[in-house]
Amino acid sequence: YRGSTHGMNEYPFLIESDGISVLPVTSMYLKHVASTERVSTGVPALDTMFGGKGYYRGNSVLVSGTSGTGKTSLTAHFVDAACARGETCVFFSFEESADQLIRNMLSIGIDLGRWVEKGLLHFHAVRPTTFGLEMHLVKIHKIIDQIKPSIVVVDPVTGLLHAGTESETRSILLRLIDFLKEKQITAVFTTLTSGAVAQEQTEIDISSLVDAWLLLRDIESGGERNRGLYILKARGIAHSNQIREFLLTNHGVELREVYLGEAGLLTGSGRVAQEAKDVSAAMLAGQEIERKQVLVQRKRMVLDAQIAALQLDLETDEQESQRIIAQEKLKIVKWERDRGEMARSRFAGEGPPEYANGSVKEPRQKGPRA
């Protein structure tokens, strides 16, 4: 195509009732807009694990886990929160019908039917073997162009393996992710992992294509299986590295705070038993602290009583000492007075003539007699 830049790849095309559709293999250049806006995951505790704000808008999120770990339930929370904000969502399901999904989510307190009635949620449920991979991609493109959603869920992407090989499925998903990123649509993909595959690996190997990856896993302990959740990666988002116990309750998904015992992470009945032990230990510790406080208070009261008695004795001794000192001072004064009187009386009887009666007399003048 002289004089113009053009794609040089081989492009598949489909002939349908409304014309010919040509699909690009993938984007020619990585020029997707990177939004800084954040959207809630629909689970407050999970938002906290993503720094308190959730995913970036326009990101692609992968939720993987074995069967029954709660992947669809987690995506239902995301859709429910988005519709509550007034956003339009499309849910592509390859395993359950729309009615079945709506009914099942009611068991955990999520009513998706109300959003369908309001025109905010659209389901597209087909078996993966209904079309080939290219036709699935065409259908997804057309539905998204028609509805113009801001949220898309594909549950599960591993279902597309029934319509093509692993490499073909990965190619289709790469093209789909690029398409969604160009339109700034936040997408959540679920993928089923089997026990034979390492948990931190997907069967179609798309973990490197997504921006965030949540892993749901079974935790076996104490003769029971419980669910756990942790974030394997989240590009550009500070995120928690903790494994959180994942509960499905009648009011939705609940992530419990990490609870560690001597043997590590505790979940289920093991956690309940350990919590009961900790409560009992805390109660005993509280009683011991109270007992020691009472003992210290009693000792303080005894000590205060002893101090009061000693202080009373001291005051009594001070008063007695002051009385004795006063008496001794009176004795000294009396003794000095008595000594002065004795001295005067002695001079009055035995002193020289000029000191008769204790008074001085002028000496008599001697001269010639008359």
Image: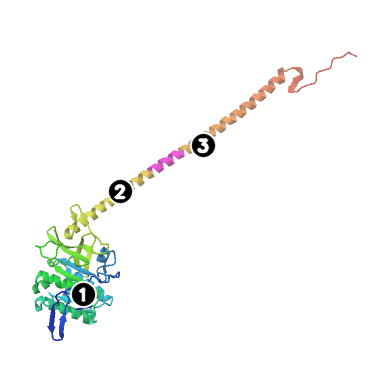
> Looking at the picture, which amino acid does disc 2 mark?
Arg
* Quarter of image, res 194: bottom left
Residue 40 locus on image (x, y percent): 27, 70
Disc 1 and disc 2 in contact, CB within 8 angstroms: no
Q: Which residue carries the number 3 mark?
A: 319
Check disc 2 and report its element: helix, strand or loop.
helix
- Categorize mark 3 by other alpha carbons within 10 Å: few (<14), some (14-19), many (20+): few
Q: Which residue carries the number 1 mark?
A: 179
First to last magenta residue range: 302-312
Check disc 3 and report its element: helix, strand or loop.
helix
Q: Is residue 343 visible?
A: yes
As drawn, the residue found furthest toward the bottom would be 17
- Which quadrant holds the C terminus? top right
Sequence-wise first label, 3 or 2: 2
> Looking at the picture, which amino acid does disc 1 mark?
Phe
307 vs 326, nearest the viewer: 307
* Quarter of image, res 126: bottom left
* Quarter of image, res 27: bottom left
User: Which residue sits at x=43%, y=38%?
Assistant: 310
